[in-house]
Amino acid sequence: MNRCYFDHNATAPPHPAALAAFAEVSQEVFGNPSSVHREGQAARQRLESARGWVSDLLGCGKKDLAFTSGGTEAANLAVLGVVRAAGTIGTHVITSAIEHPAVLNACAQLEREGAAVTYVRPDSRGRIDPEEVSNALRSETVLVSVMHANNETGVLQPVAEIARLAREAGVLMHSDGVQAVGKIPVNVRDLGVDLYSISGHKFGGLKGTGALYVRDGVHVQPLLFGGRHERNRRAGTENAAGAYAMGMAAGRLVDYTPVARLRDRLEAAVLERVPGVSVNGAGAERIPNTVNMCFDGIEGESMVIALDLRGFAVSSGSACSSGAVEPSHVLLAMGLPRDRAKSSLRFSLGPSNTEDEVDRLADAIAASCDHLRKLSPVYACS
């Protein structure tokens, strides 16, 4: 069976150049980047080359970029680092109810430490209203954190407008850009954000690599204690091989316009052929590769398994929430009832997908829906 991969938001296939770069540095340039000898300086050179490539991708200066172990650490460093630097007790944070767990759980930790957090809810399309963020601002607000693109629905958020409102209020702005980078052009200076977190394995790098943009002059309290690495922002010997691989991937991104056409082809085919289907986030601007659909009368996990058996990898939501019995917090925040939230699937495409794969997936969705609905007493009675 030729398997087809439609779960790029969970992780993208590594770029061959990234794999080759990782192997080269791991095997031949294995020195510690902080060592002064030739082997160490060779590793430092690779690390700084990677910093240049990734900073070019984000439109920032090299000194503004700190390498991390991934998007989760980068988001934690931004959220916890800013608030703790300001003095947690009595401070206030604004975030959205649709953030990735890396941000939501960091905010929950801040609440345990004495901070207040406001969770702004989206509209029915999954979009955060900048005015709602503005209305939530207080004199004690120190940080606003709103993601650039939602990992489940693909809905793009008005980050630049929210950043402008935060800046006018003298409040720092962080955006989780994990799902945006590589799929749409990103320039952190144009966005006006103060902090921006990314993850390498979402755009062709390897797992265990990420980065945080920190605007010059912004102070974050480190999460780790040790050496003076990454300009005192992230202690620990840098993963030069992983960073170099991420940099290689950053320099080899492709135009996602053809992917958008494939996404639209899949969406149209399913809506035409399968009754009782709706698109979560319809009408909102989305990243070009993602569609989240609700299939009435079907458990999402059952659909994932049925499609997996037919050779298609898809997702019922965030990979970081796999195994959770609760429906998607994102879809619930958008106003979906629990049963419809649990009946939703995410299809996230990539440059390697083809029209033939999309058409075969549409066939598999139609066949799986028909089979599962025949077994569903809920759908039979509806």
Image (cartoon, rainbow, N blue to C red):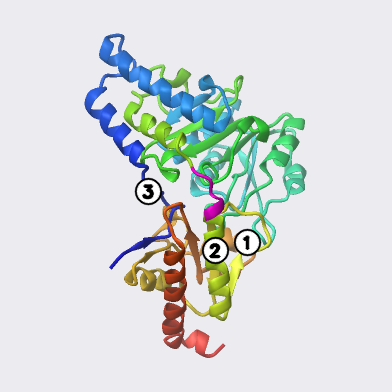
Q: Give the SS element for disc 3.
A: loop
Judging depth in this view, the residue of 124 and 19 nearest the camera is 19
Q: Earlier in the sequence, mark 1 or mark 3?
A: 3
Amino acid type, residue under disc 1 in the picture:
Gly
Residue where numbered disc 3 is placed: 13
Horizontal relation, residue 25 to residue 210: left or right: left
Label 1 or label 3, whichever lies nearer to me, is 3
Q: From this view, report whether residue 213 is shown above or below residue 3.
A: above
- Which amino acid, mark 2? Asn
Range covered by the magenta-colored residues? 254-258
The CA span between labels 1 and 3 is: 26 Å
- Does 336 sit above or below residue 174? below
Which residue position holds label 2? 292
- Was residue 189 drawn as part of the magenta stretch in this picture? no
Mark 2 is surrounded, within 10 Å at the Cα level, by few (under 14), some (14 to 19) or many (20 or more) other residues, namely: many
Res 277 quadrant in image: bottom right
User: Label 3 crowding class (10 Å Cα cut-off): few <14, some 14-19, many 20+?
Assistant: some
Of 17 and 119, the residue lying toward us: 17
Q: Which residue is mark 1?
A: 281
